[in-house]
C-alpha cells in the first residue's frame, strides 16, 4: 500500500470511486490506500488457487472470487475494504455489488512489500469475520502456506510445506501445494 490520501472519504464515495478508478484502493475507516501490482510469480500462484477452487466448486453453492472483489469488514469503530487475492463465499452478496460481506475462505499471496500488512493488519481484521473458516497466506520464496483454521475455541495457525494439501472442509475443497506451485520458480529472499 502507498500513503493514504489526506482527507477521509465516505464509504459511498469510496465505492463509487473504485468503479471508475484504474488503480485499486483499500479503505480503512475513511482513509484510502493505493495498491501496488503483483509480480508474475504472485499472479501465477493466485491464478492457480482460483483455478483449483473454481474447478472444485463448480455447480456447488460456494463461489470463488478473484482480486477485483473487495471484502467489507465491519470493525467495532469503523469499516474496512480489502482486496484479497482470492476468496470463497457460500452466502454471496447481490451480483450488482462490488464486494462481499461473508467470505468463508480468504487467500493472500505474500510479497515483500505486503507481508507485514497481510500477516498482521489484514489477518487481525479477517479473523473478526463471523463465518470465516480459513485465512490462507501463500509464500513466494518457498512452497509453503500459513493457514488460520477456525476451531471451536478460535483460530489455529498451521504451516503447510512441501507436498502438503490444505483441507477446507467448510467449502468442501482442498488446495495441493504441488498443484498451486507447479511451474512457479521460488522468489529469492532479499539480503538482510
Image (cartoon, grey):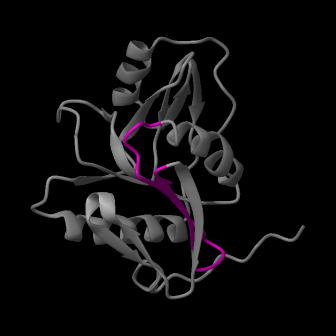
Horizontally, is 48 left or right of 173 in the view?
right
Q: Name the residue at the left extreme.
A: 59
Quarter of the picture containing the N terminus is: top right
Q: Name the residue at the front extreme.
A: 153
Count of picture labels: 0
Horizontally, is 64 left or right of 178 in the view?
left
Quarter of the picture containing the C terminus is: bottom right
Find out whether residue 132 is within the magenta segment. Answer: yes
Where 178 falls versus 2 (above or below)?
below
Who is closer to the viewer here, 175 or 141? 175
Q: Measured from the top left, where is residue 34 in percent x and y? A: 57, 35
Q: Residue at x 18, y 30 (%)?
A: 96
Q: Residue at x 29, y 66 (%)?
A: 53
Who is closer to the viewer here, 131 or 108? 131
Horizontally, is 22 left or right of 2 in the view?
left
Q: Measured from the top left, where is residue 97 in percent x and y? A: 25, 30
Q: Residue at x 50, y 88 (%)?
A: 163
Q: Residue at x 51, y 81 (%)?
A: 184
Horizontally, is 46 left or right of 142 in the view?
left
Who is closer to the viewer here, 149 or 18? 149
Where 73 falls versus 1 (above or below)?
above
Q: Which residues are magenta?
A: 129-152
Q: Quadrant of residue 51?
A: bottom left
Q: Quadrant of residue 191?
A: bottom right
Q: Name the residue at the right extreme.
A: 192
Q: Measured from the top left, where is residue 102 in percent x and y? A: 33, 38
Find out whether residue 188 is within the magenta segment. Answer: no
Q: Quadrant of residue 174?
A: bottom left
Amino acid at each position: 500500500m502507498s500513503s493514504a490520501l489526506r482527507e477521509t472519504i465516505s464509504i459511498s464515495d469510496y465505492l463509487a470511486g473504485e468503479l471508475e478508478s484504474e488503480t485499486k484502493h483499500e479503505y480503512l475507516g475513511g482513509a484510502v490506500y493505493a495498491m501496488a501490482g503483483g509480480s508474475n510469480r504472485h499472479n501465477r500462484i493466485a491464478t492457480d488457487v482460483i483455478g483449483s477452487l473454481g474447478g472444485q466448486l463448480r455447480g456447488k453453492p460456494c463461489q470463488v472470487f478473484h482480486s477485483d472483489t473487495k471484502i467489507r469488514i465491519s470493525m467495532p469503530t469503523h469499516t474496512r475494504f480489502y482486496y484479497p487475492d482470492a476468496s470463497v463465499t457460500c452466502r454471496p452478496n447481490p451480483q450488482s455489488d462490488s464486494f462481499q460481506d461473508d467470505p468463508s475462505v480468504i487467500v493472500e499471496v505474500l510479497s515483500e512489500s505486503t507481508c507485514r500488512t497481510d500477516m498482521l493488519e489484514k489477518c487481525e481484521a479477517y479473523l473478526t469475520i463471523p463465518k470465516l473458516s480459513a485465512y490462507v497466506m501463500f509464500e513466494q520464496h518457498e512452497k509453503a502456506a500459513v493457514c488460520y483454521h477456525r476451531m471451536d475455541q478460535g483460530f489455529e495457525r498451521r504451516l503447510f510445506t512441501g507436498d502438503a494439501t490444505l483441507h477446507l472442509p467448510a467449502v468442501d475443497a482442498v488446495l495441493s501445494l504441488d498443484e498451486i506451485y507447479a511451474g512457479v520458480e521460488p522468489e529469492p529472499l532479499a539480503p538482510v
